[in-house]
Image (cartoon, helix red, strand yellow):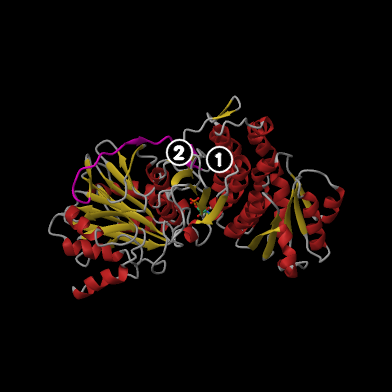
Amino acid sequence: MCGIIGYIGNKAAEPILIKGLKKMEYRGYDSAGLCLANNGKLLTIKRKGEVNELEKAIKNEKIKESKYNIGIAHTRWATHGSPSKINAHPHLDSENKIAIVHNGIIENYDSLKEILKKDKVKLRSETDSEIIAHLISKFYKGNLKEAVKKTVKLIEGSYGLAVIDKQANKIIATRNSSPLVIGVGKNETFVASDPLALMSETKKIIYLKDKQLAEINGKDFVIEDYIGNEVDFEIIELKLEAAQIEKGNYKHFMLKEIFDQPQSLRNLLAGRLKDEEIKLSLNLKNKKWRRIILCACGTSWHSCLIGKHFIEKYTNIPVEVDYASEFRYRNPVVGKNDLFIAVSQSGETADTLAALREANLKGADSLGIVNVVGSTISREVNSGVYLHAGPEIGVASTKAFSSQVLAFLLLSLYLQQEKGEKLDKKTIKEIKRLPQLVEEVLKTNQQIKKIAKKFNSINNFLYLGRGINFPVALEGALKLKEISYIHAEGYPAAEIKHGPIALIDKDLPSLFLATKDELLEKIISNMQEIKARGGKIITIANEKRKELIELSDYVVYVPKTTTELAGIVNSIPLQLLAYHTADLKNLNVDRPRNLAKSVTVE
Ligand code: AGP
């Protein structure tokens, strides 16, 4: 996901822009650039590669910082056009009088390009974004705001956009389906695609809504809709501390976030589990839904597969789990008798947002399970459960996943409670024990690091589980592949005899989730099938069963708990295995190649 930051105020813009870009590096990018404005002049510097490449280039320009107190900057995650200096943002019009930074995708790029072709405009880059600068220039008659409005009305697709011109007296910011916030300072104002970028400057944040436009003059600003009516806005005080977005003594954010989990789970429970009662403030239209649909992407989709077990157990309402990208294009049969639950750590994933909008359009009741407060999805559901897991900086999701699973358990129990049924005391007691259970399983860290050393040069891995442990296997496999680039496949253990067992040999290890539940005996026979064919086995277990030990090359013991909470406890060793495997391969654990922290493009 691209990163946008803009500044206008009484300080030098360049250091603020660079600091903001660095705060957004965790999101993944391949090039960066900035444009500074001073009366009558735009100075643009762009580089392929990391922000510090851009910083070096700025130093070589020997610019007088104080000259520029307005600017925009951008980290690009390539969608149209390869990672390169020319494709980096900001993009300017042909006369270099207007500069833009953009986050999103222009779906009607080809038809808009035709308009420019008629005007004999020569495009410099391969990007779709560049045409925005030329269109604004085409409509520009001295009023930047009006020119931007005319331009965005032509765009089909998503945009988070910040625009400056060489008059150097304002920033125009607007959005559609791509996050953008205004940061309110003293005699200065900021624009960013991620509030974390502004953390060190201001905690007063306004979340722009779709098709709202801000005209920012520095000490003040106006927010209006596209027909020119001023709109009300709410200034939210960010409850973030700098420490939350620093690594501390950890080598990577991902390791910090894995070890954050006892606390992030406590944060989720705070105020929601009191004296055997679940307290969730949800304004759900009705509770007699015919069906509950869970929609998400990636790791969040895995948490939905576990959530299905809980909701069906405690409410007896049928649950469907759907990839958001599939749901949104299927003209889905959904309506007022359905509850649609969107699950998203970032609250900005384009496919999940689009699926939610489709469900809302068709009258379904909607609920969000989201981590980022104020994010687009959290503002477009009827009600929701915030994870309160704190910022998740590592691209590979860990603490958000465990909190999503726990949120599903709380929600399921809440719905059962709302039906007037008594909650199961054992389950409540075990939920209260969960943070210390996670502390317990984190003690396997060094053992798992040793196991990672044995397997970090293999090319393929099978992760196998049954019941709730099947989604855990899927999630463990995703963790491994996305940060160590080892191909790993999660599979229902019983299914291997229907094909995948043909793959088994001494070079294809299998990891089994073999914790105590009603399916353990069956898992042990699946392990025998693998062992008989020479496959190596790593086992996650919670009791010392003789046959299980004999079948395993390595056993990692985790604390015993209920089947439901095993969905969280068992995922922790898999997070650690992926982390150490990638770290031992000296890979960029927090920013794996080709990945972004939040995929706000389709
Ligand atoms: C998980 O490790 C990945 N980073 C990715 O699959 C992620 O879960 C997915 O992109 C969904 O993101 P969201 O939860 O922010 O919607």
Label pair 2/1, CB-CB below 8 angstroms: no
Q: Is residue 308 above or below residue 104?
A: above
Q: Is residue 277 above or below residue 600?
A: above
The disc labelled 1 sits on which kind of residue? Ala
Give the SS element for disc 1: helix
The disc labelled 2 sits on which kind of residue? Leu
Please tell me whether residue 90 belongs to the stretch shown in magenta.
Answer: no
The tag earlier along the polypeptide, 2 or 1, is 2
Residue at position x 31%, y 57% from top?
A: 101
Query: What number of labels is visible?
Result: 2
Q: According to the image, label 1 marks what residue? A: 407
In the image as oriented, which residue stretches furthest toward the left?
141
Relative image position of residue 178 (x, y in whole percent): 36, 53
The mark lying in front, picked from 2 and 1, is: 2
Q: According to the image, label 2 marks what residue? A: 284
- Ligand 1 closer than 8 Å to label 2 CB: no
- Ligand 1 closer than 8 Å to label 1 CB: no
Nearer to me, 27 or 135? 135
Q: Which residues are magenta?
A: 226-246
Q: Main secondary structure of the magenta part?
A: loop
